[in-house]
Amino acid sequence: MTDITNRSTRAQSPTDSTACDGCAPMRARRDFLRTLAGSAAGALLALGAAPAVARALEVHFSGAGVRGGEVVSYPVPAGDGATIDTANEIIMVRWENYAYAFALSCPHQSTGLKWNTDDHRFQCPKHKSLYQPDGTFIEGRATRGMDRFAIRRDGDKIVVDVDKVFEQDKDTAAWTAARVALS
């Protein structure tokens, strides 16, 4: 497993509002890569390749977390801060004895969010929406908190279910529950 801790708390200051103009939505890229990986794996299997080759292909696209099915696992964060896993489009956060897993994209227009270490909050570089470390919306063009993934603790790992995303305004109870107590 690749250690992504070194990237976790590096200050990422907001960029100017044109930095992501014209960028494709983050979720569309993930869907494209999944389709591409699935097609490639299907072609390999049709040609008689061993299932291990298909698993190796999945690992190639999985990035820093350890992927197993539709979940990604991470070590329990050691201290407060954020770890951004761009390959899986997941932000892992430890804040005040809780762990959270967020979608990397801003809920307003799917621009990749940035963590500001000095202010201990997230900001969208495109339209300047601000979020607390627990994903709660503060201000800006967005109208809700950051999207949370379903997570659970499994020993010394945090397991993120990438197929279960909760939007604060559509399922407030599930959004609020999508965290793990670490104390």
Image (cartoon, rainbow, N blue to C red):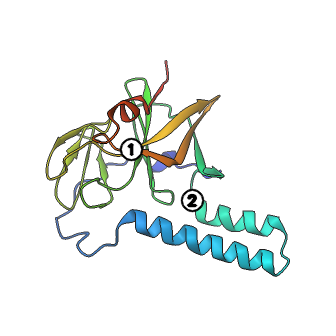
Residue at the image point whose x is 60% and y is 51% from the top: 70
In this view, the residue farthest toward the left is 140
> Is 137 located above or below residue 58 in the figure?
above
The residue that label 2 is drawn on is: 63
Camera-nearest residue between 47 and 180:
47
> How far across and down, in percent of the image, does residue 129 sit?
18, 50
Residue at the image point whose x is 60% and y is 65% from the top: 61
> How far across and down, in percent of the image, does residue 51 sit?
81, 66
Mark 2: which secondary structure?
A: loop
> How far across and down, in percent of the image, does residue 150 sit?
49, 39
Alpha carbon distance from label 1 to label 2? 18 Å
Camera-nearest residue between 171 and 62:
171
Judge the density around disc 1: few (<14), some (14-19), many (≥20) Cα neighbours within 10 Å. some
The residue that label 1 is drawn on is: 9
47 sits left or right of 130 in the view: right
Q: Amino acid at mark 2?
A: Gly
Residue at the image point whose x is 23% and y is 69% from the top: 19
> Is 69 located above or below residue 145 in the figure?
below
The answer to which image quadrant residue 95 occupies is top left
In this view, the residue farthest toward the front is 170
Counting residues from the start of the chain, the first of labels 1 and 2 encountered is 1
Judge the density around disc 2: few (<14), some (14-19), many (≥20) Cα neighbours within 10 Å. some
The answer to which image quadrant residue 139 occupies is top left
Mark 1: which secondary structure?
A: loop
